[in-house]
Image (cartoon, rainbow, N blue to C red):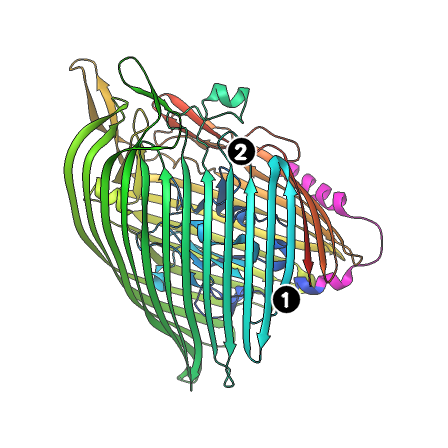
Amino acid sequence: MKKCLLLLALLGGACLAPGRSAAEELGSHEVDEVVVSATRTERKTEDIPAAVSTVTKEELKDMRLLGVKEALTGMAGVQAETRNGGYDARLIIRGAGLKARYGIREIMILLDGVPITDPDGMTRLDFVDTQLIERVDVVRGPNSTLYGANAAGGVVNVITRNPFEEIRGLTLGYGSDDTRLYNLIYGTSVGQTYFTLSGTHKSTDGWRQWSRFETSQGGARIGHLFADGSTLEMNFNYTEADLQLPGSLSEEAFRADSTQLTSEPFRHSSRDSEIYSTGLKLKKDFGAIQLKPLVYYQHWQHLHPVTGMINDGGADVYGVDIQADLEHSFFGRKGLLTFGTAGQVDASEGDKFTYRDVATSPSGQILFTLSDAKGELAEFNDDTVSKWGVYAQESLTLSEPWLLDFGVRYDRVKFDLEAEIFQEFVFGANRYLPNRQSIEVDRSYDQISPRIGSVYKVTDWLHLYGNLSTGFQTPQSSELAENPDLDVARTRNIETGLKGRFPGGHRFDLAVFYMEVQDEIVQTVLEGGETSYSNAGETDKRGIELEMEVHPLPGLALGGTYTYSDFEFDEFLEPVRIFNPVSGTTETVLLDRGGNRLPYIPEHQYSVFGLYRHSSGFKCRIDANSWGEYWVDNANSEKYSGYDFLTNFMVGWENDRWNVTVDAYNVFDKLYAMEVTKSGETLAFRPGAPRTLFAKVSYQF
């Protein structure tokens, strides 16, 4: 801790430059943060009975924002990483999302309040044009009461530019590994109708072999203000993204050269996708009721080589959410009832192919892939997953210091899965073998998710809160097809905390929680890389999260976060495949992992930062993140040491029209792994990025 405090002091000194006072900058720190994600209605963060973090417009404009990961790094209770610097973000909140092999699981992701999480819980961030992000709200802990299935870990709402502003700007950026960024946004209005067009292109050669990515995005938004104060928004977005996803390295290769091609046999994992999305939102008052209906449609198509197979398919997602807010009085107490219904249907079709170009041994075993070209048809899938729910939450002001929230939601999630399999990759044999079979799964899950929370205003600057909340997570379609007996994972959360908002912009948020997860869906990695899924019985999660920020001098902000995580399996019999030398066959046995800690989650994680803004427009920021040691497998057989003070630095200048920044990530060029796993006796290292530089210029016209 002394080391942490010393660095925090140095961070402020490194950025503090002599000159005129920047007292006017303090005003931006005292603006009340208002979020919608936690309660579906606008409310100050200190009045929300849950752990909430926000990333503001002021913070975002100084970032590269090549991916969402940058905005979430260093946040308490949140772990965010990327393999290639682009869209491929891995996101974990309080341990939820740990088992996702790709994409994001167990966390509800919203884009301007519209779900981009599929009914089975998968989220792809290809939808998000990061250069348009104006704010990110993160609600930690289960929130299925308002958002239904697949919000067991939390909710992330990515909020883009206001459609009712005439925003006009150009951004250009260039950095290491031929990284390029171009963005243009143009907004105008005719009377009370606003039109906004935007376009973004991002690309990089990547710092590793097979880590290139290139994305092009375009969007159009129309917003209309009616005379009675009602608003109507319509949007259309298009994305084309090509990403190479580098795999892991052996420990020897990691130490020798972390930029080299993966040591894995399947060396050409990637995702080439094309996405269209559109939506319509209305906000209109009918007396004491405010109606907020929205409808949306999303279509995606991708070619996605992964371990063993090449996926070629797509889906159409249709959704509706009709929300109403009713202001009322209950025995003289002010109340707000939020209620509604939401539905979503995901209809997908896809083929799976073998890899065409592979290197083989004399016996025919696949040694490694040579390209991501498709070979023979191996499987056909035709799946429909639907999600429907009704919800209601009452917010009552019991007295001047007391606020009470209580609500409940009912959900039904239905899976209708069909697959025709012709051949499969058998990990034990390291080759494709015929396996003609048909799979049909028709499974429904019904769940009720209650929640109650309260905020007590101790003083004008100190608020105490507590909540009892629930969440549930369905299996993903691919998991259910492999194991049709999987049950939903159910989460119960008990949480209390303090939120301080002081004059001068000083602030802190402290959360203490205990979560009990029943039947958590756990991925098991068998010998050779084959994966399996099972319900773990029970998992206990205890944690402490602290975020704080102080402003000791005009224009200077110092702060940091600390996360303590004590996550362990209470009951878990893990299926493990072992070789029996007596019979000469491979058998699956159940090994007791009860009492073991969850892999990858460090017990201690913390970050510190220093930010200085001068009235002349000069600014600089330095931050450092530390990730403690963690177990690399469910058996807790070995630990990875983590890393300390991974440091980033930014310097820049801005005025009303210009914003210029130059930054360096991983300033001291540390060699570190963003993840270490263990399969059998073999360790696999996913290397983190070395030092990279980037310069960005934005002009508002």
Span highlighted in magenta in the image: 1-26
| Marking on residue 482 | none
Mark 1 highlights which residue? 31
Q: How far is disc 1 from disc 2 in space, using C-alphas?
A: 36 Å
SS label for mark 2: loop
Q: Does residue 59 sit above or below 422 in this rendering?
A: below
Q: Residue at x 42, y 77 (%)?
A: 336
Mark 2 highlights which residue? 688
Q: Residue at x 75, y 43 (%)?
A: 14
Q: Earlier in the sequence, mark 1 or mark 2?
A: 1
Query: Please, what is the three-letter code of the amino acid marked with disc 1?
Result: Val
* Residue 605 in the figure: left or right of residue 585: right
Q: Residue 4 colored magenta?
A: yes
Magenta span: chief secondary structure: helix
Q: Tell me where residue 266 appears, x and y as whole percent.
A: 37, 28
Q: Tell me where residue 202 appears, x and y as whole percent.
A: 55, 46
Q: Nearer the viewer, mark 1 or mark 2?
A: 2
Residue 149 shows up from this direction: no
